[in-house]
Image: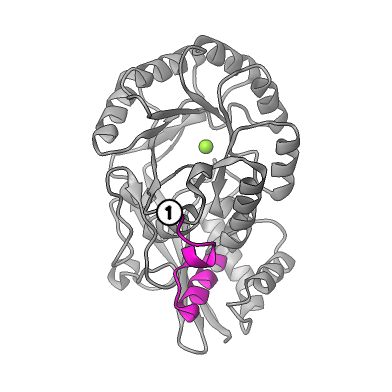
Amino acid sequence: MKIRKISAYQTDLPLAEGPYNWSGGNTVSVFDSTLVQVDTDEGVCGYGEVCPLGPAYLPAFAEGARTGIAKIGPSLIGMDPTCLGVLNRRMDEALKGHPYVKSPIDIACWDILGRVAGLPISSLLGGRQADDFVLYRAISQETPARMAELVSTHRAEGYTRFQLKVGADPAEDVERIRAAAAVVGPGDRLIADANTGWLMHDAMRVVRAVRDVDVYIEQPCLSYEECLSVRRHTRHPFVLDESIASVGALLRANGDAAMDVINLKISKLGGLTKASQLRDLCVSLGIAMTVEDTWGGDFTTAAIAHLAHSTPPQFLFTSTDFNSYVTVSTARNPPVRQRGRLAAPAAPGLGLEPRREVLGEPVLVVE
Ligand code: MG
């Protein structure tokens, strides 16, 4: 089997609840998502999506994904899409870095591999570990009262894990954490994600001020060293996200006991091949994970679901259903959450077929 054509579709994904705000005054109202279709000479095709969280979150942006796909696409034509290791090596030879460019191509080839094997990707990644898996809800940075209200709303929908977007003024962030903590129930989990927004002294003030609250602290500062310093001065469970972008970073952080949980985003690593490597390593090392991506619609949600559903539940701290945040559906049969939980599609591959009327014409074709 050979790759015959690689196409990319651009889709705007507006947010249902209005702008999504996080640290540093960053905000997104409409996500720019890229769906990649990989066609083969045997008629089988696969799909993969990448949707950066705007251009200011990671070193990744939507137009860059499409430009990068145009750059590496020609070197992939004629390759066997079911040989994921060979394909990933070729992508890494053709383009240094830029994992988010490679992620949708890698996912589309996993989709093809699953369709050829007649198995869902979750089976290829180790198999479903339970009936379903747990989700979190991201709470946009708003006033403390509004954030508490959003937690209550989503709690009523069945969510039990809430990731508060903090990383702003430390005193107000303390109020945000306290307001949300007041409305969660026993067994719920609260995460304060600063998204690199605090300096060390800000972070130290916040963790000291909420030391009586059962809250996880996620990526307080920009650099790994700053986060490690905060980690060493707090008893809160600690999550690293932006700092964990490679196997090397994970191993160093594990050696330093720098976190209890990592946030594993598929496109941050470069696709399911590398994300599953990290996932398996975390299981071996005893590190729990939030399994997700930077953002996306139905196809990203399905890719996350296959990786999350095949992760042992005790290691899956939480995951996410991004397709429920946006108003546009790009697939006919998307995964839909039930009471704050989700299951991976059971059909072969990713298990989704696109809505052609939503995708329109490709913005890029390499053949
Ligand atoms: Mg995070």
Residue 191 on the magenta segment: no
Residue linked to disc 1: 32
Query: Around disc 1, counting alpha carbons within 10 Å, would you say few (fewer than 14), some (14 to 19), or many (20 or more)?
Result: many
In the image, residue 302 above or below residue 312: below
**Residue range highlighted in magenta:** 106-129
Q: Left of 299 or right of it: where is 221?
A: right
- State the residue at coordinates (55%, 59%): 65
x%, y% of residue 91? 67, 68
For the question of whether residue 364 can be seen, the reply is: no
Residue drawn at the location 57% of the way across and 87% of the way down: 1
Judged by its main secondary structure, the magenta piece is helix
Residue 282 locus on image (x, y percent): 63, 46
Residue 126 located within the stretch drawn in magenta: yes
Q: Residue at x 69, y 43 (%)?
A: 250
The kind of secondary structure element at disc 1 is: strand
Q: Is mark 1 within 8 Å of ligand 1?
A: no
Amino acid at circle 1 = Asp
* Quadrant the C terminus occupies: bottom right
